[in-house]
């Protein structure tokens, strides 16, 4: 703990950047927030309704629409203003599944545990076919298997031996691991040619998807089955097929638990004919790609900087086989609860505090990127369609960032998207001026285990949409719990694996961070932003 | 390792009991055994056929019969003699299931992962009903729910919160844990009144089973659902209903993964009607209780003690939702492989080496107990039917042990039934004279990790059938691997979780132990046997 002690002393006791001092933390308000969060919490009720009651929230699915409606009505009922949907273009088709099953009929009968990939067509009732192993990863593979797969159930992955689980499923930080997190590993810089290679591979993948989908249709493949990426009976499954519907739908596609997948592969290996009966009661709920919607709501500022924005958010969309309770029901429930708390304690922030519940995060931060492009900054659209299809970071020429009027009025964004584990600190994203601020803000929550500010960059979720255009966007350090062993993108992402006490703690801290940011004398400091 | 070093020194260098010296280990033969086991192993081929190909082997099920046939033909093909089935009376009805599924139709559609309890009736196709929570654990419960459960799917357990998995799934012994195992905890003695209480509770349970089965039939309950005893999507399921068919069959009964069970319970808790569609494609394959069969085979002795028996064994029966690969395909494959190895290396044992592949272990060591009663010793049958229905250990008067002629000709039995983990030592069962013998026998396998002899008693499997009548019966200390976290009585008990290298090591040690026991100058020493 020594190191944090030292850093806190620096933040509290001495002049650091002049931007913030510990006295900027209103301890009376922090106390009210903390009491509301820990003693009168509604975070589990919010999570329960959104996940157990409404269910999983695949981008543009009917239940995502329900969740959008319900979260808006909740935010309105708590007195938030400017509650609205914000359109995000071209998010793909709606899709849902009601049921799925795979039965091995022979060489011996056995129900196999498998669930469908999102955006793959249903089987139109029960269908039967023989299993065959065929790798379909390149044009050469497709050529090789042409004419040989009609009516077959194609197992597309190799058998994967069981990997012993030598770490505990469930993980909480301790002093040592939090200290280790502060050490900043100098990142390896990718060379221009490596980046070009990445872009090339990305383009190849993009080009192959329609080819294989068309192949599966043309060849009359009954279904494909892949192996779950985790062992121990966990179905870890995301999307497949054709989300946007601009290409062939492909075939019904399942992901199967490793133990059952391997059982089939061993049978095939000893030349035993494997007969399967499959059912995927899945369907596209819209016929073509349409817009999706972020949910936006505000507590309006009432001070001299009321036109400036402090933002908190999490993604409302989820994968489809659990109930998205941890990815990212937890983040959404905490962000909503933080807004409820601020209203409940009568906070009157100087700046406007805005909540964003994003859609399409799982498809590439689509909702949050769209929000940033609409309000703060964007790169110009390339005229070359091949370049345009690339993510901005992979384009050979990004062009110059086009800043909108909102860019200068934006202060800071806080995100939560690593399951339901409590907050142990903040990733500083190399914004050195942020560290002493966060350390001061965390101080009233040190006794709840939130202590660590690291300059490490963390990625892969919606704060990156802000960070990528030079706006301060942060994600919290959380206890991992069993997020990356049982829950992430699996059928076990249900409420059982969400920790109530942790969510209460996180709600208190997020509400406090939002309030503190809204009350700072100046806009939140920005790091030096280089457009490369 | 100090302590083992000391104990080995005692065994090897000094006079211990006079019964055995390290020089009794024929290192030439041990070397041949070891090479055959580690370099020309067939243990995985045996395991593969028995588990992946034949499948699970529920006592008296059709696939148990297949496994009996196949193991006998394998043992014959390796040149064993006196290969035969040995009848075990009244083992119950045959039962099997081909498929099972549970769909939540409302409040929102979601496939629920559940599998049937063995010996429960099928659903006769897909059936639909509403879920209801009802505890049915006593006559008072049955009275309370009479007339209220017709056509319902009864959830019989409370919601159980997720318990974080704070130990690694996969465990191997280290020096420390092996040393700890040597320490002998003085057992608490159960008083006469405690034992009477145990017997009373046992009788009550026995008496309640037919009542609830009849209740479920009379009340027209559609099905019952219980919660899996382990978290993380694992279906841990054993038997229910009526194995012997001497009472009502009860209702179709499922065990559901905790995450889905709790999802239903939370919906019921918020008064949402939960509509389920269930299918259990299960059936009794014989109409009344019939005999089952142990598999017995021998390598005949050719020395002066050829009428004496050294025995190795494991149970061939398994539960029904995996393939019984670890419980106890692993033990069976190792025991069969040990016999194969002994034939392959041309062993000519003095005593006869017999293998027993037991049936009915999961129902209470029924096969091995029957074997012991038939050949070695038995307690008299009580005339009181209530006493007769109790396990021998719970009877108020056991009577005097009746020794058969085989009792004196029996030397020692070795069992393996703790999954596929390699052998790290032997449980001595408080047979103090056995320790120096085992230490000497383990010495050529110390470099393969088999080092520890503990006097602890281990229970719950077939060596107890021997131990209970004063015959030397032992079970090995094994690395636990993920046996008690993923595998034991679960749908994940399939070949993936069996470790090839560990099984090879175990085969070598078992073959060597059997050979050494068959070559000892005297019969294996017996501990002082008190009939209480």
Image (cartoon, coloured by chain):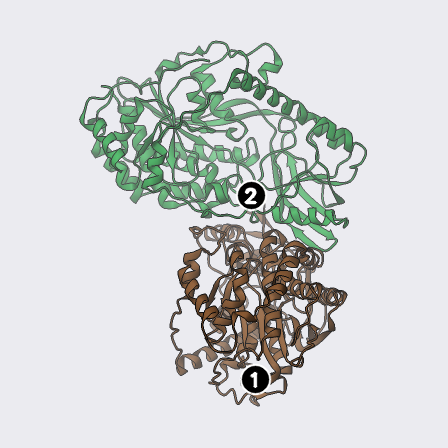
Chain colours: A green, B brown
> The residue tagged with tag 2: helix, strand or loop?
loop
Residue B220 appears in the rendering: no
Please state which of the two labelled residues, at mark 2 or mark 1, is closer to the viewer: 2
Query: What numbered label is drawn on residue B160?
Result: none
* Above or below B79: residue A497: above
Residue at coordinates 26% horizontally, 20% vertically from top-left?
Answer: A303
Label 1 environment density (alpha carbons within 10 Å; few <14, some 14–19, many ≥20): few
> The residue tagged with tag 1: helix, strand or loop?
helix
Give coordinates of residue A480: x percent, y percent: 42, 41
Q: Chain of mark 2?
A: A
In the picture of the structure, the residue carrying the numbered disc 2 is A230
* Above or below A20: residue B7: below
Residue at coordinates 51% horizontally, 79% vertically from top-left?
Answer: B203
Q: Chain of mark 1?
A: B
User: Which of the image's four quarters has the N terminus of chain B?
Assistant: bottom left
* Above or below A470: residue B524: below
Give coordinates of residue A337: x percent, y percent: 36, 36
Labelled pair 2, 1 in contact (Cβ < 8 Å): no
Give B312 or A504, whichever is nearer the viewer: B312
Residue B52 appears in the rendering: yes
Label 2 environment density (alpha carbons within 10 Å; few <14, some 14–19, many ≥20): some
Same subunit, tags 2 and 1: no
Residue at coordinates 52% horizontally, 89% vertically from top-left?
Answer: B399
Farthest residue to the right: give it. Answer: A147
Q: How many marks?
A: 2
Give coordinates of residue A285: x percent, y percent: 63, 33
Give coordinates of residue A204: x percent, y percent: 64, 22
Instruction: Work out how far the residue at label 2 is from the one at label 1, CA to CA, in angstroms.
Output: 49 Å
In the picture of the structure, the residue carrying the numbered disc 1 is B388
Give B281 or A137, whichever is nearer the viewer: A137
Give B337 or B266, whichever is nearer the viewer: B337
């Amino acid at each position: 703990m020594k190191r944090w002690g030292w850093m806190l002393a620096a933040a509290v006791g001495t002049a650091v950047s002049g931007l913030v001092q510990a006295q900027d933390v209103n301890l009376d308000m922090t106390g009210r927030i903390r009491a509301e969060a820990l003693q009168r919490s509604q975070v589990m009720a919010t999570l329960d309704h959104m996940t157990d009651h409404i269910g999983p929230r695949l981008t543009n699915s009917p239940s995502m629409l329900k969740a959008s409606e319900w979260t808006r009505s909740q935010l309105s009922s708590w007195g938030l203003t400017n509650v609205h949907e914000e359109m995000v273009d071209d998010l793909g088709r709606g899709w849902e599944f009601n049921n799925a099953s795979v039965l091995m009929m022979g060489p011996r009968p056995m129900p196999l545990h498998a669930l469908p990939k999102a955006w793959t067509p249903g089987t139109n009732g029960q269908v039967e076919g023989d299993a065959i192993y065929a790798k379909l990863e390149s044009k050469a593979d497709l050529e090789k298997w042409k004419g040989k797969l009609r009516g077959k159930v194609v197992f597309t992955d190799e058998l994967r031996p069981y990997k012993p689980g030598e770490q505990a499923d469930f993980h909480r930080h301790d002093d040592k691991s939090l200290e280790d997190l502060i050490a900043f590993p100098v990142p390896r810089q990718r060379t221009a040619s490596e980046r070009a290679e990445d872009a090339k591979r990305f383009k190849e993948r993009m080009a192959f998807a329609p080819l294989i989908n068309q192949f599966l249709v043309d060849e009359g493949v009954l279904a494909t089955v892949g192996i779950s990426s985790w062992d121990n009976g966990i179905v870890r499954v995301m999307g497949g097929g054709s989300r946007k519907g601009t290409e062939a739908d492909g075939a019904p596609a399942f992901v199967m638990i490793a133990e059952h997948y391997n059982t089939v592969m061993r049978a095939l290996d000893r030349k035993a004919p494997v007969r399967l009966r499959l059912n995927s009661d899945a369907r596209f709920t819209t016929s073509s790609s349409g817009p999706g919607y972020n949910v936006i709501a505000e507590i309006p500022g009432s001070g001299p900087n009321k036109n400036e924005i402090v933002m908190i958010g999490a993604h409302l969309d989820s994968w489809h086989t659990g109930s998205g309770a941890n990815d990212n029901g937890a983040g959404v429930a905490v962000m909503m609860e933080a807004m409820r708390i601020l209203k409940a304690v009568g906070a009157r922030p100087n700046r406007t505090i805005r909540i964003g519940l994003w859609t399409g995060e799982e498809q590439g931060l689509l909702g949050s990127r769209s929000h940033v492009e609409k309000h703060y900054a964007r790169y110009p659209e390339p005229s070359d369609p091949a370049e345009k299809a690339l993510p901005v970071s992979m384009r050979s020429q990004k062009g110059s960032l086009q800043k909108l009027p909102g860019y200068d009025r934006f202060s800071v964004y806080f995100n939560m998207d690593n399951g339901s584990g409590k907050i142990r600190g903040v990733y500083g994203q190399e914004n050195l001026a942020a560290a002493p601020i966060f350390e001061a803000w965390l101080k009233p929550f040190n006794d709840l285990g939130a202590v660590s500010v690291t300059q490490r960059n963390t990625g892969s979720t919606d704060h990156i949409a802000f960070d990528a255009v030079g706006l301060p966007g942060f994600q919290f350090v959380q206890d991992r719990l069993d997020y990356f062993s049982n829950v992430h993108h699996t059928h076990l992402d249900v409420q059982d694996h969400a920790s109530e006490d942790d969510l209460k703690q996180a709600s208190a801290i997020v509400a406090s961070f939002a309030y503190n940011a809204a009350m700072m004398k100046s806009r939140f400091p920005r790091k030096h932003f280089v457009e490369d």
